[in-house]
Image (cartoon, coloured by chain):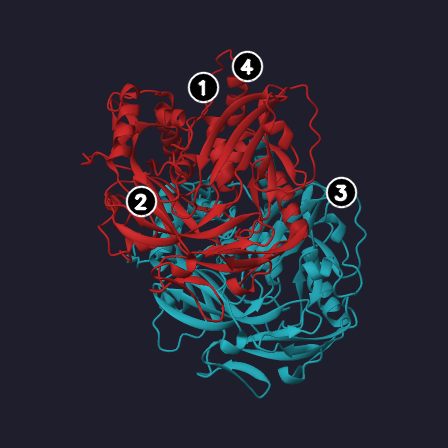
Chain colours: A red, B cyan
């Protein structure tokens, strides 16, 4: 009985994925609406030395950067030991499960998702499309003492509608120490009063918008990655789309695949231990910022924000600012008429599950270190067909100007691909099965798998 | 294709579950063999004050109890904050993934599993039935400098046989800080030379032995809980067995259930932070043992072991000794002809995933605190039918005399059961689906679910 119902949810969302336009939010109006909402928000983001950041200070002893109230998030240090090398780094300390939620409702028989134009201080363009609700535990317990978060009642028990999706997934494990979010989609059958910043869009529209630079924020991207869809019933005659369909149909997850992944965990055996921010070797505070002595990786910087249209209108906070843009790439290839995707088992400082499946390429500042498959993903023209190419911002509430290139590249079917240790081809079904479990697939790979799905 | 293969594995193990005797290891010989093996091992376990434990010492500053080599495990402290209360406690610090593995091979067309009579210093009766291999990372990297672990080659890559089961699960989360094991079943088609301590048994035989006190060690129990079986094809006419069969057939896991579980995580929002052992409030070292000032919970004690038949023949180590025996109980009930099991979402100090599904009752030393459903599980005679009742030892390599009562009790179908916050009825299928994911079901519930399965 439940199996049938689950299938119905996936099929229902599939109808939404196939709807590339909407009667309630026509594509023709979108650009004007989004431009108007972006212009309607006034805000200023000004850099402030960490040493002068109002409300924030370095804790005696540990040197951790924390809010004087003891709330919100902070920065601490972490020491990582792995089978492939050791390192130390600062990391965001926010041990909680936040809520990232989309309300869904049918219009003209098609499921729509409620998104909002939302400003975050770290976004390059400040305003992006966010989920219906994006709430840290502090938000929903009102630690900020701001206005109540609109629509939050749909996500907290006793919620009026049914949760169709409710998956806990990790934040960016390179920079967050075990922070998680519930990725939720909750249905409603009733009218939802919405303001000018909110908009109902179909899954097909959202997939389309994922192809635009810096438009869907990382919260929207991760929730979208948890929305199940069913493979189309039949081939279309387009070899690429049919290979994608077959990949979505199977093969599914099995213990053989888990065994390979677990072998990798055994070989890497990462151990991450928190330490005081002051104890992290190679990192130092100078000019009011914390950076690595090599000038690489990222900096922790302070900003003062004024945003009259936010729940809290004025605040100061630290943000992570990467030194260089990153490249996140997924290589795919047709094999016997079925598309396969090349994943990489990664150990990052904040992974609570030891290792996660990442994309083929995930690199920021590589220095002189060779990165496997970087050329195949980045070269222009490269060896393959570019199936997706966009710039996306990471979580603007914690990252400043963290804009990364996301690419899905299909290699020619006849090109031999030597697969190094730690890399593995998966079907799309296997990747989505893994995403149905907590903490198996990292947030970068989740975005890229959604980008791949969106090309069907 | 893979779906069919997975089903075949479950069906194959189902044939083994239905085989309650074996041509190669007849039940008639078992008791004599086990008695002989128990007698063949000579060993002494002698208590030693922690302050005089050879090779172990308290680390300056933190006060952590560690081996002077820096290897093996240690004891540190942890501070836990939850929505239902805060506490501090000592905890085993062993951040690694060990291997618990069974080799499986067909005899007369029936899959058998290779177990061994193994001594552990903390076991009440010292010798119990263990998995083919039980290896900490230290073991398999030879940190102990002892003899090589027999049969380990079946579990490390490149392994000769296929891994039919490979699931990472947490250790006892009340006492281990995020320690995990790979629960593996690896097939072999070849002769495996075995010594007198090893024995091939069917799943049906192992399920039968689970009903005996202190016979299957906790390592064997957790691997058995990961062995998939298929529901019998048809009703037998026995209402209890048929209700169990239907529960195993479904309904399966859905996001509704996950949403309830995630709501509980949101309400409890546990945060566990390591601290030095010396900083743990309420615990103190006296008479060479570490205990709680109330005299409750557990003690950390030292032992010196001589065991000429082990890989390492002589060593000293600390062990956790519970102050009182524990009670682990699972209530089940027939509802519309389908058996359902009552689970409890628990937050323990070492849970890496915030909360886990535990059994209905899991209590050790409760003091005056009322424990829901304790009476229903423990009363003699009680309101229900006792479907399983045994004493089982927890991991004898870390616990001393940790013998707990495991009970599965079926309540009458017409008995109303008010379900408190944090408790939920599941089908057996849902419970097993959750067990197929990492870290969702705790080790006590895994043993009880296997005990329930063994009654089919």
Quarter of the image with the N terminus of chain A is top left
Q: Is residue A289 above or below residue A23?
A: below
For the question of whether residue B413 can be seen, the reply is no
Spatial CA span between label 4 and label 1? 15 Å
The reply to whether discs 1 and 3 touch (Cβ–Cβ < 8 Å) is: no
| Label 1: which secondary element | loop
Q: Nearest the camera: B165 or A367?
A: A367
Q: Are marks 4 and 2 on the same chain?
A: yes
| Residue corresponding to mark 1 | A233
Query: Label 2 marks which chain's residue?
Result: A
Query: Label 4, on which residue?
Result: A239
- A111 on left or right of B116: left
The Cα–Cα distance between marks 4 and 3, rounded to whole angstroms, is: 38 Å
Q: Which residue is mark 2?
A: A44
Q: Which mark is residue B126?
A: none
Return the disc, 4 or 1, that comes first in the chain's sequence. Answer: 1
Secondary structure state at the residue bearing disc 4: helix
Sequence order check, earlier mark of 2 and 1 = 2
Side (left or right) of B350 relative to B338:
right
In the image, residue A277 sits, relative to residue A270, either above or below, namely: below
Q: Residue at x 33, y 64 (%)?
A: A69
Residue A212 can be seen in this image: yes
Q: Residues within 10 Å of mark 1 (few under 14, many from 20)?
A: few
Subunit bearing disc 3: B
The residue beneath circle 3 is B160
Q: Nearer the viewer, mark 2 or mark 3?
A: 2
Q: Earlier in the sequence, mark 4 or mark 2?
A: 2
State which chain disc 4 sits on: A
């Amino acid at each position: 009985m439940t199996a049938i119902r689950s299938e119905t949810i996936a099929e229902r969302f599939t109808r939404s994925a196939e709807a590339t336009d909407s009667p309630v939010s026509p594509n023709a109006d979108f650009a004007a609406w989004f431009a108007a909402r972006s212009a309607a928000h006034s805000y200023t983001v000004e850099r402030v030395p960490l040493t002068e950041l109002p409300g924030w200070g370095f804790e005696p002893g540990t040197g951790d950067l924390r809010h004087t109230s003891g709330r919100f998030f902070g920065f601490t240090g972490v020491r990582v030991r792995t089978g492939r090398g050791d390192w130390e780094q600062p990391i965001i300390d926010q041990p909680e499960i936040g809520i990232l939620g989309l309300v869904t409702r049918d219009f003209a028989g098609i499921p729509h998702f409620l998104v909002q134009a939302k400003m975050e201080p770290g976004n390059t363009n400040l305003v992006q499309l966010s989920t219906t609700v994006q709430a840290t535990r502090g938000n929903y317990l009102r630690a900020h003492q701001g206005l109540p978060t609109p629509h939050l009642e749909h996500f907290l028990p006793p919620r009026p509608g049914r949760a169709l999706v409710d998956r806990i997934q990790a934040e960016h494990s390179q920079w967050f120490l075990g922070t998680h979010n519930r990725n939720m989609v909750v249905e409603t059958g009733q009218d939802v009063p919405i303001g000018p910043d909110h908009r109902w869009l179909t899954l097909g529209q959202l997939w389309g918008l994922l192809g635009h630079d810096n438009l869907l924020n990382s919260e929207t991207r991760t929730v979208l990655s948890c929305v199940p869809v069913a493979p189309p019933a039949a081939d279309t005659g387009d070899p690429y789309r049919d290979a994608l369909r077959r990949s979505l149909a199977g093969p599914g997850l099995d213990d053989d695949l888990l065994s390979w992944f677990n072998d990798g965990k055994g070989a890497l055996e990462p151990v991450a231990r928190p330490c005081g921010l002051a104890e992290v070797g190679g990192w130092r505070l100078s000019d009011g910022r914390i950076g690595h002595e090599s000038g690489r990786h990222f900096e922790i910087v302070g900003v003062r924000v004024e945003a009259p249209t936010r729940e809290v209108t004025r605040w100061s906070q630290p943000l992570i600012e990467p030194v260089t843009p990153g490249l996140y790439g997924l290589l795919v290839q047709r094999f016997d008429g079925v598309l396969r995707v090349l994943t990489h088992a990664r150990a990052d400082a904040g992974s609570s599950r030891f290792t996660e499946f990442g994309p083929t390429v995930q690199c920021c500042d590589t220095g002189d270190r060779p990165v496997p498959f970087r050329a195949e993903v980045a070269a222009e023209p490269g060896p393959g067909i570019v199936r997706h190419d966009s710039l996306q911002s990471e979580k603007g509430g914690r990252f400043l100007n963290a804009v990364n290139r996301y690419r899905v590249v299909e290699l020619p079917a006849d090109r031999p691909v030597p697969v190094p240790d730690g890399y593995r081809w998966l079907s799309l079904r296997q990747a989505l099965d893994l995403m149905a479990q907590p903490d198996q697939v990292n947030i970068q790979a989740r975005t890229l798998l959604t980008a791949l799905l969106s090309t069907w």
